Amino acid sequence: MDTKRLDLNLLATLEALLEERNVTRAAARLHLSQPAVSAQLNRLRDMFNDPLLVPAQRGMTPTAMALQLLTPLRQALDQVRDTVVTHRHFDPAQAELTVTIACTDYLQSVIGLSLIQKLRQQAPGIRLAIRNLEPPRLETQMVRGEVDLALMTPAEAPPTLRTRHLYDEHYVLVGRQGHPQLGDNMSLEEYARLEHVVVSLSGGNFSTPVDQALQALGHTRNVVLSVASFLFIPEIVAQSHLVALVPWRLVAGRTDLKLVKAPTVSRGFSVGMVWHERNHGHSAHRWVREQVGSCLVG
């Protein structure tokens, strides 16, 4: 490849094609005609001596080389874009826009108050809309502009969206203070005999991956209540003999609950931010992402 004749516009087109996986959508994003983008794709294929994208049932599928190119390509173009926009001054106090964030009930509880306070103090013109996360619809929602930012496990996000890891969460076993059977060094058998509350986001399910792991070890958990939201659990267990596995940040600092190390059969999860390319370089959205990150990591 003759890098002296390298056209950065072609690389921007390649980035859009790899993320959109559709010539028409890539053309709309780049404000170019579809024939122009098709012609640039042909030039890119010649440049890399690879098809890069091949026709699929829906849109196009990247080749192995194209997938290898995406991350370093993004990083290189981001550096160029950042260099171009660093001179622009963004004043949160003067910004006026609405930002829609999709996340689970647990993250709504963890981030809600601190983020709202921060925005009211520093950016009173930014309105915040928080909605429930719908993973199967997320990509479409972001393409349509219905969701600006999602908080979720980054590995579960559609590959066309941008992600940033924020922190790793772990579960704790919680019950009321003074619970007679809740101890720090319980065996799996003792743990299984407790009366448990589980969360079923779809509603009504009494079995979770924890139960499947316990069954593989010969134990059956005594699940007596299934709820559709983590937010109910702290109040339920604080006033009963029930116990539950919940994310640590949901109950951190509560003095009416006893927190015990979770059994080995429970696994943690990572939390990150997910957003669409259209908002990546937008100064206000970038500032909001920084505030969300500081609320969750700081």
Image (cartoon, rainbow, N blue to C red):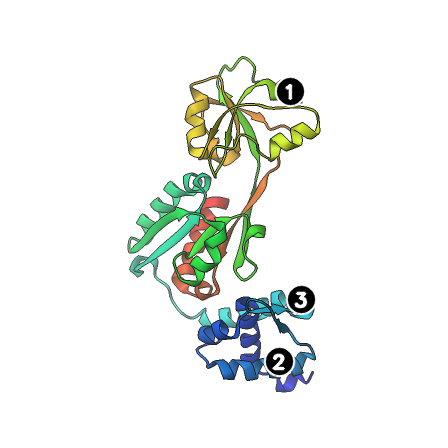
Whether residue 5 is visible to the viewer of this picture, yes or no, is yes
Dot 1: what SS?
loop
Find numbered disc 2 in the image and state the secondary structure of the residue it sits on.
helix
User: How far apart are the two marked residues, 2 and 1, measured between alpha carbons?
Assistant: 61 Å
Residue identified by numbered label 2: 44
63, 113: nearer the viewer: 63
Q: Is residue 230 above or below residue 239?
A: below
Q: Amino acid at mark 1?
A: Asn
Q: Which residue is mark 3?
A: 68
Evaluate if marks 2 and 1 touch, with contact meaning CB atoms under 8 Å apart.
no
**Amino acid type for the residue under numbered disc 2:** Leu
Res 14 quadrant in image: bottom right
Tell me if label 3 and label 2 are in contact, CB under 8 Å: no
75 horizontally vs 204: left or right: right
At horizontal 41% and vertical 25% (from top left) the residue drawn is 235
* Residue type for callout 3: Gln
For residue 185, which numbered disc appears in the image? 1
Task: Give the position of the N terminus as an image quadrant.
Answer: bottom right
The first of marks 3 and 2 along the sequence is 2
Q: Whole-percent x and y of residue 41?
A: 58, 80
Report the Cα–Cα distance between label 1 and label 3: 47 Å
Q: Nearer the viewer, residue 182 or 195?
A: 195
**Residue in view at x 52 percent, y 68 percent:** 20
Q: Secondary structure at mark 3?
A: helix
Question: In whole angstroms, how far apart are the C-alphas of marks 3 and 2?
Answer: 15 Å
At label 1, counting other C-alpha atoms closer than 10 Å, the crowd grade (few under 14, some 14-19, many 20 or more) is few
Q: Is residue 224 left or right of residue 64?
A: left
Residue 264 seen in the figure: no
Residue 42 point in image, percent of width and height: 61, 82
CA neighbours of label 2 inside 10 A, class few (<14), some (14 to 19), many (20+): some
Answer with mark 1 or mark 3, whichever residue precedes in sequence: 3
